[in-house]
Amino acid sequence: AQSVTQPDIHITVSEGASLELRCNYSYGATPYLFWYVQSPGQGLQLLLKYFSGDTLVQGIKGFEAEFKRSQSSFNLRKPSVHWSDAAEYFCAVGARRNSGKLIFGQGTTLQVKP
Amino acid sequence: NAGVTQTPKFQVLKTGQSMTLQCAQDMNHNSMYWYRQDPGMGLRLIYYSASEGTTDKGEVPNGYNVSRLNKREFSLRLESAAPSQTSVYFCASSEAPSGRATEQYFGPGTRLTVT
């Protein structure tokens, strides 16, 4: 069965500092991986996705993520955080043939200090 | 191109009342999903519809029913609301060709309170 773990429930970083949000997944085959962002009171917006190929993927808003098969991880990074990045971030995993279903992690809330 | 729309945005129900949450997508997607979001629990799948005419249970289906009215619309019904169903409900859709996971697009959510 697939599962996703986001070890950090809450992270606080200073504006301008770098950011790394952790995501570990459990899945027997090559997973399809996603990161979403949710601003307060809003729906989820896709930041980036990994299906195959280059293990470093670029997304919107200056985010990137790296797929590491050996570590079953798909960590999200940003070199310099802006106050507007404060939000909740969700990692999700999907499979090749599973009705398109995604399994979501519990989320990491990012707070940005001025 | 509105993407995924949901109605209503907010709803307050008394225990035992019924209601239907509406969802529509204009992206010609095959698959549609209903999730609930509770603090500290991420998103949990209630029901999904892999294609028009099919529906299946997700992780937390008890107390809910769904209808895939056509390719565009997927509704969620609470027959007899309970306080435990107080939550934020999201509808999503995806292309999901041959069941392969693709990005899901989310609606703005419905905040439901059951008193």
Image (cartoon, coloured by chain):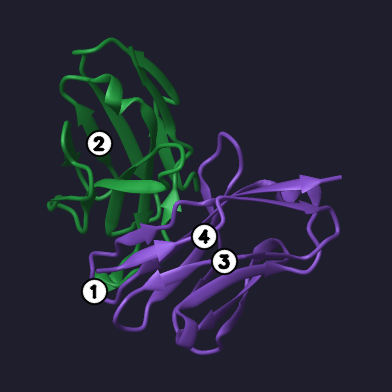
Chain colours: A purple, B green
- SS for tag 4? loop
- The disc placed on residue A22 is 3
**Callout 3: residue from which chain?**
A
Residue wearing tag 2: B75
- The disc placed on residue A7 is 4
Disc tally is 4
Name the residue: 50% across, 60% down: A6
**Residue B115 quadrant:** top left
Q: In this view, does B99 lie to the left or right of B55?
A: right
Image x and y of residue A99, in percent: 23, 64
The residues tagged by marks 3 and 1 sit, at their Cα atoms, a distance apart of 26 Å
**Callout 4: residue from which chain?**
A
Amino acid type shown at disc 1: Arg
Image x and y of residue A24, in percent: 46, 70
User: Relative to B6, does residue B80 appear above or below in the rendering?
Assistant: above
- SS for tag 3? loop
Q: Is residue B35 left or right of residue A10?
A: left
**Callout 1: residue from which chain?**
A
User: Relative to B67, does residue B98 appear above or below in the rendering?
Assistant: below
Marked residue nearer the N-terminal end (3 or 4):
4
- SS for tag 2? strand
User: Relative to B72, does residue B19 appear above or below in the rendering?
Assistant: above
Amino acid type shown at disc 3: Arg
Marked residue nearer the N-terminal end (1 or 4):
4
Pointers 3 and 4 in contact (C-beta within 8 Å) = yes
